[in-house]
Amino acid sequence: MHYFKKMLGNTQSPPGVAMSEVLWSWLGSFLGIALVALVHYKLLDRTGLVMIIGSFGASAVLVYGAIRSPLAQPRNLIGGHMLSAAIGVTAFQLIGGQPWLAAALAVSTAIAVMHLTRTLHPPGGATALIAVIGSDAVHKLGYLYILIPAGLGAVVMLIVALLVNNLAQNRRYPEFWW
Amino acid sequence: MNASNLRECAPVEISDSDVMAAMKSMQGYIDITPADFREVYHLAYALAKERMMAAFKASDIMSTPVHAVRTDTDLITTATLLAEKGISGAPVTDDAGRVVGVISEKDFFRQMGASQGETFMAVVAHCLKNKGCAATPMKNRTAGDIMTAPAISASAEVTIGAISALLMEKNINRLPIVETDGHLVGIVTRSDLVNAFCMLG
């Protein structure tokens, strides 16, 4: 019975945030994604490279909307994306013929590795998954996927986070670097 | 004192709404549930308490040298010593200087008719009920006759946490600190403990 009782939950959601926090989150994520998307559409369009991948939308939630979270810190943002990217590409190259298996292995292994390296960053799961289920353009990148888009995109978002999150008097980022 | 009187030094219980109010007063989205915060708080508090209780040992806080009497010291001398030094009790040692008991006000009270409670007011009540009372029966007796024995003592290495627990459990006010062979090296009283906890801030 204890097993089912645990499903009832035992506490409540943390409080909602002030309107100023909503606005700063909006501004940071607007600028962060805008910059990543500009690089993608204006600079890399004809090079075969990609910059924007879905997982950065998830990263934006953390690094602009929950900036005190351990999951949102630079170590996690950069480390989580790059490690997961490496695992995703490896999974595709080894067993891409069985996409369902490659996809499952990529995400689950990425989570395990992020845990072990203390770089847990939820969007890393998406980065690993996209390496398997992504477009041909993504597949063609091979291990370059780790640097562009995963590494570079994360760095661009980090720079915007440092600049925007520290503008407000009572906001600060990061909590720790490494 | 029975077990229910032994109050645990438990952390101040904080409620979910306390945590919610604190989170609200902080800027930004706090990525933790109130229950998780309380769990962290309790675990951290237990560790802090452990650290503080082990921060000082008996040797750090004990009073030394100790005013002690011997088993053959007569009670007039004993009472005079306690009065002069302004203390309410002292260890009792044998010929070889080993602690064999503790003599305190309580032991005198008991001799003066305070059969229950062993307090000064118990003596007063006894004297009023019995049309006066006298300390004279004690005149020719020695510390060894009326002391509380065996002595509850401890080594210099014992922590203030263990001393606090012992004083509470045995309902005593002072703890002679002895070497392994029973020789007296110091004494820790309740006021020494108060000072120690004061130093811990």
Image (cartoon, coloured by chain):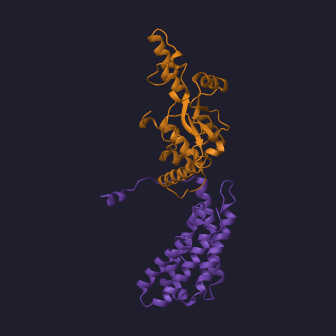
- For residue A125, above or below residue B113: below
Residue drawn at (68%, 56%), measured in percent from left and top?
A168
- For residue B52, above or below residue A43: above
x then y, percent, for residue A151: 62, 78
Q: Foreground: A62 or B92?
A: B92
Q: Quadrant of residue A149?
A: bottom right
Q: Foreground: A49 or B4?
A: B4
Screen quadrant of the C terminus of chain B: top right
Q: Foreground: A68 or A17?
A: A68
How many numbered marks, from 0 up? 0
Q: Quadrant of residue B68?
A: top right
- For residue B88, above or below residue B94: above
- For residue B66, above or below residue A72: above
Q: Residue furthest left?
A: A1
Residue drawn at (46%, 77%), measured in percent from left and top?
A108
Residue drawn at (55%, 90%), measured in percent from left and top?
A140
- Tell me the orange chain: B
Q: Foreground: B118 or B56?
A: B118
Residue drawn at (53%, 88%), measured in percent from left and top?
A139
x then y, percent, for residue A28: 63, 64
x then y, percent, for residue B15: 48, 45
Does residue B134 appear to the left or right of B57 in the view shown?
A: left
Image hue for chain A:
purple
Q: Quadrant of residue A150?
A: bottom right
Screen quadrant of the N terminus of chain B: top left
Question: Is residue A101 among what the camera can see?
Answer: yes
Question: Is residue B201 among what the camera can see?
Answer: no
Q: Residue furthest front?
A: B95
x then y, percent, for residue B37: 51, 53
Does residue B4 appear to the left or right of A119 in the view shown?
A: left
